[in-house]
């Protein structure tokens, strides 16, 4: 399965990812928080998307899991699933 980052600057193949996690981030100088989804590989980490609430970030993680489950059920030779990180 392929995951395309929210800003479309990163394309990641799920087979290369060791883990996905939500991460609390500071959004601006006012100290407002946002929550990112970070992909971890053997070589680096990269942020795939940012969301206003931790709940939304976890919801997006569940969407990725569901897309992966669907992709695993597809027969050999089928087109690979592409998951695009939602804007919000």
Image (tube, helix red, strand yellow):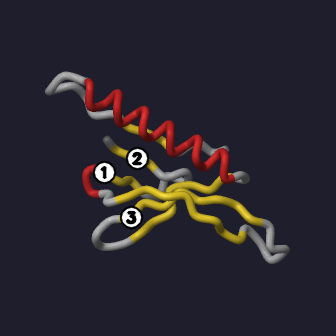
Task: Check disc 1 and report its element: helix, strand or loop.
Answer: strand
Task: Check disc 2 and report its element: helix, strand or loop.
Answer: strand
Of circles 3 and 2, the one toward us is 3
Q: Residue at x 38, y 64 (%)?
A: 40
Toward the right, the furthest residue is 30
Residue 31 versus residue 65 in the image, above or below: below
Q: Is tag 1's residue or tag 2's residue first in the polypeptide sequence?
A: 2
Of circles 1 and 3, the one toward us is 3
Q: Residue at x 35, y 27 (%)?
A: 70
The residue to which callout 3 is attached is 40
In the rendered image, residue 62, in percent from the top left (x then y), is placed at 50, 39
In the rendered image, residue 33, in percent from the top left (x then y), is placed at 74, 65
Toward the left, the furthest residue is 76
Quarter of the image with the C terminus in it: top right
In the rendered image, residue 48, in percent from the top left (x then y), is placed at 50, 56
Q: Is tag 3's residue or tag 2's residue first in the polypeptide sequence?
A: 2
Question: Marks 2 and 1: in contact by CB < 8 Å?
Answer: yes
The residue to which callout 1 is attached is 13
Residue 81 versus residue 85 in the image, above or below: above
Numbered mark located on residue 70 in the image: none
Q: Is tag 1's residue or tag 3's residue first in the polypeptide sequence?
A: 1
In the image, 62 versus 77, the foreground residue is 62
The residue to which callout 2 is attached is 3
Mark 1–mark 2 Cα distance, whole angstroms, equals: 6 Å
């Amino acid at each position: 399965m392929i995951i395309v980052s929210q800003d479309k600057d990163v394309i990641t193949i799920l087979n290369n990812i060791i883990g996905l996690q939500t991460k609390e981030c500071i959004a601006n100088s006012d100290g407002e928080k946002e929550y990112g989804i970070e992909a971890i590989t053997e070589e680096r980490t990269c942020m795939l998307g940012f969301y206003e609430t931790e709940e939304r970030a976890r919801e997006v993680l569940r969407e990725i899991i569901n897309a992966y489950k669907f992709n695993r059920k597809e027969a050999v030779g089928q087109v690979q699933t592409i998951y695009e990180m939602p804007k919000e």
